[in-house]
């Protein structure tokens, strides 16, 4: 499909720079079949059915944004994907000043050598020393806010909490599974009281999620791989919910993509551990999920293509036009949608 089909006009004032407070006070646009309803995230228990299952991503965002120098040159690095105990693939700002083997000094005693430049412009960074890389990042790194927020304000102390979900446990993501940012312990208790269960999986979101689609046709776009895991107990639970007539509703596109990566053509979810680069566009046949909770996404993005595959492109364009006209807040810190095809 032509990427231009997924374009729309978005006023910049619709981009949220801070999350709603409290988190579950965010607005929620419900698309339920042909019905469209304006709700809030706090209304979610009444929009679900007893026997449904919400599936959250329990990845934890690491402070993966680094600022350093190579000689007199300023170098920025956003870690993307772990390749070894001390080696990370990273997108580099001012990469033209780097050659293979060059050391980058990120301050606080954190030094990494750049090597193995890839076609996408990324480098491998090999961190020096014996300390765990996680400790080095805590010392020298910052939370990696999405570029459409970082361009408008600096990262600050609030983001260390705001950009982490209540489910965050497994460290390794460089971007938050933002649909789950809306959830609070009180909301989860209300959902459970309504007879709706929840489960977790792990997908370490990479910085590639923010890269623009440069291809003209979706068939020519290459997704970056991300590591994920669904254990056997979770896979069996997802299958049992659907077998008993319940719905599996992914909370976030990250959860959805991992479930679909693990699902067989007949709809069974298998245990999964490894990389996935699944790219979902209109025409895709969903196998493992029955609905999605997600935020509002960028024009021409792979995530808007995904929701268009789930609900139909015309339906999503109309829904986004409604959201813009009615002052919904967009992107990572913005409002939510509940999509039930």
Image (tube, rainbow, N blue to C red):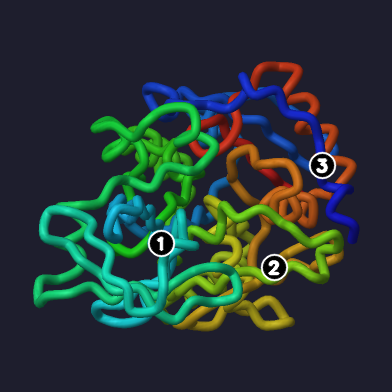
**Residue 248 pos. (x, y %):** 59, 59
Q: Residue at x 9, y 77 (%)?
A: 130
In the displayed structure, does residue 114 sit left or right of residue 299?
Answer: left
**Residue 202 pos. (x, y %):** 41, 66
The secondary structure type at the circle numbered 2 is: loop
The secondary structure type at the circle numbered 3 is: loop
Q: Up-down: is 164 above or below 41?
A: below
The N terminus: image quadrant: bottom right
Question: Reading the chain from its start, which is encountered first: label 2 or label 3?
Answer: 3
- The residue carrying mark 3 is 7
Q: Residue at x 43, y 62 (%)?
A: 97
Structural distance between the alpha carbons of marks 2 and 3: 18 Å
- The residue carrying mark 2 is 279
**Residue 321 pos. (x, y %):** 80, 27
**Residue 270 pos. (x, y %):** 54, 82
In the displayed structure, does residue 201 sit left or right of residue 303?
Answer: left
- The residue carrying mark 1 is 200
Q: How many marks?
A: 3
Structural distance between the alpha carbons of marks 1 and 3: 33 Å
Q: Nearer the viewer, residue 245 or 248?
A: 248
């Amino acid at each position: 499909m032509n990427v231009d089909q997924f374009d729309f006009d978005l006023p910049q004032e619709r981009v949220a720079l801070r999350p709603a407070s409290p988190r579950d006070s965010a607005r929620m646009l419900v698309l339920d079949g042909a019905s469209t309803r304006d709700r809030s995230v706090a209304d979610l228990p009444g929009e679900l059915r007893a026997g449904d299952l919400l599936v959250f991503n329990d990845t934890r965002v690491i402070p993966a944004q680094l600022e350093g120098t190579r000689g007199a040159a300023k170098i920025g690095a956003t870690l993307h994907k772990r390749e070894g105990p001390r080696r990370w693939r990273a997108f580099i700002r001012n990469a033209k000043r780097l050659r293979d083997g060059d050391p980058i000094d990120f301050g606080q005693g954190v030094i990494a050598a750049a090597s193995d430049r890839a076609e996408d412009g990324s480098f491998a960074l090999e961190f020096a020393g014996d300390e765990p890389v996680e400790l080095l990042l805590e010392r020298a790194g910052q939370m990696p806010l999405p570029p459409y927020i970082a361009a408008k304000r600096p990262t600050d102390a609030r983001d260390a909490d705001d950009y982490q979900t209540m489910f965050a446990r497994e460290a390794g993501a460089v971007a938050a599974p933002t649909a789950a940012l809306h959830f609070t312990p009180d909301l989860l208790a209300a959902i459970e009281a309504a007879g709706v269960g929840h489960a977790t999986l792990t997908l370490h979101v990479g910085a590639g999620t923010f890269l623009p689609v440069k291809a003209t046709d979706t068939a020519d776009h290459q997704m970056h791989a991300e590591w994920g895991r669904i254990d056997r107990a979770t896979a069996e639970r997802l299958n049992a919910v659907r077998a008993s007539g319940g719905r599996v509703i992914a909370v976030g596109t990250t959860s959805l993509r991992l479930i679909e990566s693990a699902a067989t053509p007949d709809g069974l979810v298998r245990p999964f551990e490894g990389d996935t680069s699944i790219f979902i566009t209109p025409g895709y046949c969903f196998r493992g999920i029955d609905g999605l909770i997600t935020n509002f996404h960028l024009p021409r993005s792979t995530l808007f293509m995904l929701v268009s595959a789930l609900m139909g492109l015309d339906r999503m364009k109309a829904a986004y036009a409604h959201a813009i006209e009615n002052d919904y807040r967009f992107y990572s810190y913005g409002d939510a949608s509940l999509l039930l095809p």
